[in-house]
Amino acid sequence: MPILEAPEKVLRTVEDLLRRSKGRLSPPDAAAATGLSLVDIKDALARLIEIYECRVTVNESTGALQFVFAYPLRRHGQKTLRENLFDLLAWCWKIFKAIYKAAIGVILIVYTVAFVILLLGLMIAGSRGGKDSDGFGDLIGGLFRAIFEGIRLAAWTGLVTRYEPERGSTRYKKFQPEPNKGKSFIQSVYSFVFGPERPPFDPLADAREAAAFIRKNRGRLTAGHIIALAGPTYDRAEALMAEYAVRFRGELEIAESGTVVGTYTELLESVTPDLAGGVIEYYADEVEPPYEFTGNSTGRNVGIACMNLFNLVMSLVGLGYFSFEMESVPLALALGIFPLIFSVLFFAIPIGRIPFVLGLRQRRERSVMRKRMVRAIMAAAPAPLSLEGLIQAKAVQPEEGPLARSVLEQLLREMRGHLELDPNGIVLYSFPRLVADWAAA
């Protein structure tokens, strides 16, 4: 019968041993080095996996199960200085966005109405002022003509953007309804400046999906299954194997094929079978929605831009009309400086977003291709892939060849694959480890 030590003492002992072994440890080795029971060591390792970044893999020289902690030991969520700076910038942007967003729609509408009333008043006054007001009257008339032309253009171009299905994939998540169908004007203004809202990230979605797959797969899970479900690199999949073993109280073992297999018998127990759990959606089918600049129809964008352009011009008129004498300063601030700053930001923010959206579109294009290549690997298993074969099968268009080759080469590094040559000298992309892990359980 094992002698159980105090948990705190065991945890400190195993943690010290981890540091001496530079993060690599197996329970039998830890028991031999410390004299502690395997029960104590497994409990301590489970706790350490919750604290520090770790992955589970097979020792290539001995074939035994081993835990590989990041060395030096690194806590989950521990961030570098660079990451902390980005978090600070993101926090500042979030605060600015919340403040600007809280007033954006109201200010745009209020100033547009106020300036229209002011224009009408100035036009009436100008009609009584004789020839001295002719220049100002021409400016007023030109502004109204610009507004009416903008409205006419908006009506002519008021088309709703639609998207074709992704090649080789099923669907992607997108807020409904379609742009401008039931979408309020204020929401359209937000989208014009900051871009359309996207479905929020759910940090537990992958864990729910893994739990649903475990139940469907008779309580068994491998790193290959995790890759097929969520598409991480092999190192990350092995880290998730360790995390899920602790989260779902699984037992890890080495199969005859040399694959680490997690068995989760407790997860199969169900008291309420009708309770909704995670939905299994494989990585190749999880295509994110396209990145849009505004998500509005062209007509609505033109209308919003015309309103802000009108306010921008009127703020410049206000700056020129009101002097900065003591009694006119409040009017100069209210009808000149403040709306000018607001209107400039209204255009500057979406213009500044353009390079970021273009970059995100390129990243998404590569991500979609990666999903298509993972689908092709699974479909062709256990046979290797060739780019020429994918093009012949019309899974990849000829113009997509360079991108597909780049993605396959990246997958070779991430999924521990290797290159082969067939008798005709065609390059083959082989992923034996991924295929073996997928078929192991």
Image: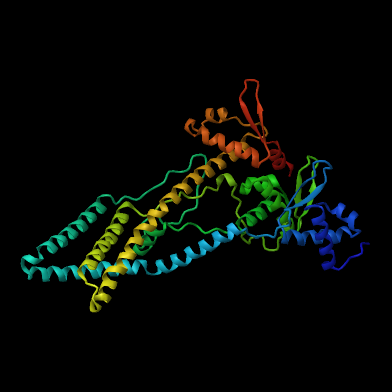
Residue sitting farthest toward the front: 325
Residue toward you, 12 or 174: 12
Q: Is residue 54 above or below residue 371?
A: below
Residue drawn at x 65%, y 39% is 413
Say which quadrant the N terminus sits in.
Answer: bottom right
Residue sitting farthest toward the bottom: 327
Say which quadrant the C terminus sits in.
Answer: top right
Residue 74 visible from this viewpoint: yes
387 sits to left or right of 117: right
Residue drawn at x 21%, y 58% is 147
Residue sitting farthest toward the top: 424
The image shows a total of numbered marks equal to: 0
Report x, y in % for residue 421: 65, 25
Query: Image quadrant of residue 113?
Result: bottom left
Q: Is residue 329 above or below residue 5?
A: below
Query: Image quadrant of residue 46?
Result: bottom right
Q: Is residue 400 above or below residue 127?
A: above
71 sits to left or right of 203: right
Residue drawn at x 49%, y 43% is 365
Residue toward you, 179 or 94: 94
